Image: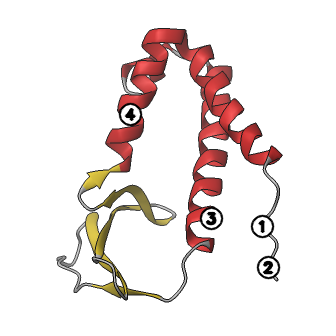
Amino acid sequence: MGANWRRASPEQREQLVREFKTLLVRTYSSALAAYRDQVIEFKPLRAQVGDAQVTVRSEVRQSGAQAVSIDYEMEKTASGWKVYDVKISGASLAATYRDIFAEEVRNHGIEGLIDSLSSKNHQNDARPAAVNT
């Protein structure tokens, strides 16, 4: 959100965090549930003792498809290591969301962004659950 975060009221910030967290959890859980017959290879960690930020590099391999690199940008916090960005084939999800959010705020304001996130989350609620047979 950048500068737009500072312009948001405390209530708007709370709504943004809640809606974005819901969107992320649903997006990643759906993606992970779709994995079949894939191998995730974690690359050696390049870090020094005492580093507060590291990149955990991995590669997802599937027969008949090109490998996909997934890098996790992590930061050490008081409560442990936290992922703050995921890069898929070099594309930063944080940068992508930042650009999308900035455009939404420019076009429809902070309330418009909240409504857009909420709408995406409710669309996911309306989708029928997959049935395993």
**Along the polypeptide, which appears first: circle 2 or circle 4?**
4
Provide the secondary structure element on which disc 3 rests.
helix
**SS type, badge 1:** loop
Query: Is 66 left, or right, of 96 in this rendering?
Result: left
Depicted 41 relative to depicted 120: above or below:
below
| Residue positioned 62% across, 46% down in the render | 23
Check disc 4 and report the residue beneath it. 98
Depth check: 38 or 20 in front? 38
Mark before the other along the chain sequence, 3 or 4 = 3
Q: Between marks 2 and 1, how big is the CA–CA gap?
A: 6 Å
**What is the x, y in percent for residue 75?**
35, 60
What separation in Å lies between label 3 and label 4 (alpha carbons)?
A: 21 Å
What amino acid does circle 3 point to? Ser
Q: Residues within 10 Å of mark 3 (few under 14, many from 20)?
A: few
Q: Which mark is residue 29?
A: 3
Q: Amino acid at mark 1?
A: Ala
Amino acid residing under circle 2: Asn
Q: Which of disc 1 and disc 4 is earlier in sequence?
A: 4
Residue named by callout 2: 132
